[in-house]
Image (spheres, helix red, strand yellow):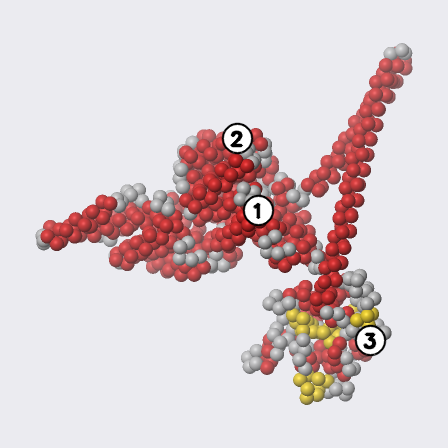
Amino acid sequence: MESFKYRAFISYSHKDEKWGKWLHRKLEGFRVPDILVGRQAKHGKIPKRMFPIFRDREELPSSAQLGEAIKEALEQSGHLIVICSPNAARSKWVNQEIKDFKAMGREHRILYMIVSGEPYAADHSGSKGKECFPEAAKYGVGEDGFYTNSRAEPIAADARENGDGERNAFLKIVAGLLGVGLDDLKRRALQQKHRKLGLIAAASTLATIATIVLATYAFMQRNAAEDSRNEAEVARNQAEASQQRAEKARTQAELSRQKAENEQAKERTVTNFVTELFASVEPENAKRMDTKLVRAMLDKGAGRLEELDNEPETEARLRLTLGSTYRSIGAFDQAEEQLSKALPLLQETVGANDLRTIEVMNELALVHQAKGNHKAVESLLETVLETRRQVLPEDHAETLRAQTDLAALYRSQGIYEKSETLCSEALDKLQETRGEDDPLTIRAMIELASVFFDQGKFVQAKSRFRSALELSRIKLGEEHPDTLRATARLVRTQKELDEFDEAQSLWESNSELMKKVFGEDHPETLAEKDAGAEIIAARGDGPDALEMYLEILRQKERSLGNMHPGTFGTMEAIAKLHFEARRFENAAFSYDEIFILMSQKYGNEHPETLRIMNLLAECFMMEGKYDGAFTRLETALETETRVLGPEDPLTLRTQVSLGELHYIGDRKDLAMEIFTQALETQERVLGLDHHQVTRTRDLRNRILAEQAAAVEEASENEPSDTEADDSQAAVDIVTDDPIDENSSADALPSPDSSPEEDELKK
């Protein structure tokens, strides 16, 4: 039987002190599964706890040998655990501790854990600084403490992300200390977790009983209060017999009544507190609470999740709740972090097709949607919809919810025909199975109205928004978040229809309700302020609109930070205001500022970063800075083709913009080739009536018209039958596909005109 004072000695470089502390805390806090305790293993009977563990906390004196206290601790330790890193490889103390432990004849009791660097990197030229194994780990050591000629091959637990990961590396160390297999340890830990869940279920039952007891107590108190009121009435009746006793009785009765009402009020407060305490964890309710308070509570809860290392399924569920709640208050980076950690945990424990896993994917997709990363959203939502269709009925609420979410994604990309088809199908099924006043049906109605809005079909959009709003008010109430969102959409539709007074009045009342429900600093409240500035700008008061936008921007930077999607939205609105007022230099400055911030936050390959680069290039084109526009568009097109694909709407838009530049540079054959190729793909992906398709068609027709005019002019100068036929054929082509006089192609400068003439035309 072993009689060591310490279970293990942790050897590490003091530059890796955080790893030493982490491992020390984890080992001493680890509870060995009950089923393993007392069992005879490789190193003797398995203990209940691995305590104590020795960790050197002080720097050693500057001598060539280890201190006596350290040597004594090594001798009294059952194992040596070496934290391997380039720092450890350079530490003479770590190396000496390994040598001394091996000299004691206990080489088989040394456990290695890699936290950084590369094993055997010193054996390769140019990689010596990356070596993580100390020299003594790689060679045998004799009883005299000197190296032998035998080469050691240490097997290590790898805590790096590309290795075992922290959790599995830690379990490997535990298995080595206990002298059991890793699979056996994991299996026993899982069995213990199931027993713990049973205890949790029992505790939940006790909590339910406690709630019933509390409710019973409240009921008894209400009865007592009712009795007190009855006694007061009796006292008042008896007081009528005697004037002197009556006054005293009335006073006593009033006191009894007040006491009874106070007791009732207290019981109501207690009951409401218990109810709201459990209800407040729901993400929907978090929207109605103070954003900063909710954020503080979530941050505190997130910090404690590391305590659930051995309960991955429970940890995943909590991370899902945290991620959903973070998303509800607009904290998208924190939401993405929690959901990204929850997803692999559920994939490993319950499987990729489990509905809980799919729910996490759905939430993660909504976070990416809020951050404008439609490529990541599309992959996730298509998987969510496909899996729900396999597991659930076609008309199940969650299946139709996923279909509506996918329709919203296609709408944001400008793929309106596909979006409208998906959304209409979902809406029909929801109305048939759940009724028109179901919250999910109302949400689908709002999404379909949004498809019409984005296509410029404002009359249809207004009718549908108004219907959805009335249903939401009746079913959910004036202050429900979905009602407020439907109102916000209707405000913007009225603004587009030049119904400014109605839009202004509705916006003012909705803004006040949003402050009340969400709070002043909530992203949705701040986003609604943008709508007010939009109305002012639409009325033609640009300076006042700009002043309001700047004030909103300052408030968003204070509340959300300068890199929040909501902040980017206001910055883009300011840039658009400058562009529409033909202040192209100011617009370019604003777009460039957004581009720099997005590059820092998302990287240069994110769809939103690429979209802003397109808008910046458009400003340069309007300023006549064609070289700058060409450079940015070429860079964007290469990235979009590689990352988003050649048929992505943003890729096609960039391609057409490059064609415009070739047209301006009198490279019309190349421009014609680009327009023809892009138009064929756009018509297939976006549909024949899409505004981008119309723009490309008009640009192509302009070149065809110029070619036809040139042929006709040549025919008049040198008439011949062949040239006349060619001229008529070109004219026929243009006639079959007429030019849209309102298209953006008319804004392009003619190669034969001067910049001054173009400016006068504009």
Q: Please tell me the numbered disc located at residue 470.
A: 2
Find residue 264 and report its image quarter. top right
Label 1 residue SS = loop
Query: Where's the N terminus, which quadrant?
Result: bottom right
Residue bearing the label numbered 3? 76
Residue visible at 58% across and 32% down in the picture: 475
Q: Is residue 57 above or below residue 221?
A: below
Residue behind mark 1: 392
Labels 2 and 3: the sequence-earlier one: 3
Q: Position of residue 287 (x, y in %)?
A: 61, 42
Disc 2 crowd, CA 10 A, few/some/many (<14, 14-19, 20+): some
Q: Position of residue 24 (x, y in %)?
A: 75, 66
Image quarter where the C terminus lies is top left
Seen from the viewer's position, the closer of residues 507 and 546 is: 507
Q: What SS does tag 3 mark?
A: loop
* Closer to us: 350 or 285: 350
Name above or below for residue 634 compared with residue 270. Answer: below
Q: Is residue 136 left or right of residue 638?
A: right
In this view, the residue in front, 563 or 446, is 446
Q: CA distance from mark 3 to mark 1?
A: 60 Å
The amino acid type found where label 2 is placed reads Glu
| First in residue order: circle 1 vs circle 2 | 1
Q: Amino acid at mark 3?
A: Gln
Give the x, y percent position of residue 104: 78, 82
Q: Give the label on residue 455, or none.
A: none
The Cα atoms of the two marked residues, 2 and 3, are separated by 77 Å
